[in-house]
Amino acid sequence: NAGVTQTPKFRVLKTGQSMTLLCAQDMNHEYMYWYRQDPGMGLRLIHYSVGEGTTAKGEVPDGYNVSRLKKQNFLLGLESAAPSQTSVYFCASGGFPGDTEAFFGQGTRLTVV
Amino acid sequence: GESVGLHLPTLSVQEGDNSIINCAYSNSASDYFIWYKQESGKGPQFIIDIRSNMDKRQGQRVTVLLNKTVKHLSLQIAATQPGDSAVYFCAENWGNNDMRFGAGTRLTVKP
């Protein structure tokens, strides 16, 4: 049972480049989340999805887009990367908060130069 | 040892001692709270949760206390072990599936 898998694990981008981070879960969870974690700070919610075909904004959504075309996958896109988006990105999946715990992926370390 | 979470982001304890990690949450309407453990290079791992209709919940070697009056959450770890060394985050449910995390407290266990 793989749980939550993020691809890639590391990436370096130049300012203005685009990329997509993939999150895949095999637990049949309805809810999936993308967070970013910066040094000395907790995780901040970027976008989330409550089911296939749905997405919603979190605390820090600007500069990111997401898609949930399949229940098991949640994609995070950066259309024009900026140095301020240098961070570690975590995907999580789970049930509704309070019903099922959220399981996190291992993280993607993104550097924008 | 005891920390105040966001104000003292590090806590160092001797192996075998009890640890207390504190968290001040911000939303009085939050109805659900989670403590996560994050080891270096890994994603956060669920430790224990508590709903707002409870003031205490116990797990294996861990206890979470909730004081809604002062919006305070604490995590108590009994007989702390070297494997407990990690960063600990509290998270509160702001509603609409938005779990907000604190900045974390780094726990170091000295042998």
Image: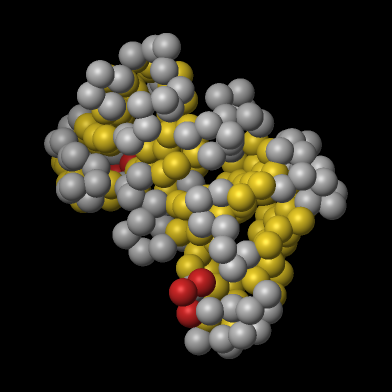
The residue drawn where x is 45% and y is 59% is A37
How far across and down, in percent of the image, does residue B109 sit? 23, 46
The residue drawn where x is 21% and y is 50% is B10
How far across and down, in percent of the image, does residue A100 sit? 61, 27
Write down the quadrant of residue A110 in the picture.
Answer: bottom right
Is B65 on the left or on the right of A30, as rendered? left
How far across and down, in percent of the image, does residue A46 sit? 56, 54
The residue drawn where x is 23% and y is 24% is B70
Closer to us: B34 or B63: B34
Is B2 on the left or on the right of A95, as rendered? left
Closer to us: A98 or A27: A98
Number of marks present in the image shown: 0
The reply to whether residue A32 is visible in this rendering is yes
Name the residue at the right extreme: A70
Write down the quadrant of residue A80 in the picture.
Answer: bottom right
Query: Is B50 above or below relative to A106?
Result: above
Colour approach in the figure = secondary structure
The residue drawn where x is 77% and y is 39% is A51
How far across and down, in percent of the image, does residue B96 sit? 58, 34
The reply to whether residue B83 is visible in this rendering is no
Closer to us: A4 or A29: A29
Is A6 on the left or on the right of B27, as rendered? right
Quarter that holds the N terminus of chain B? top left
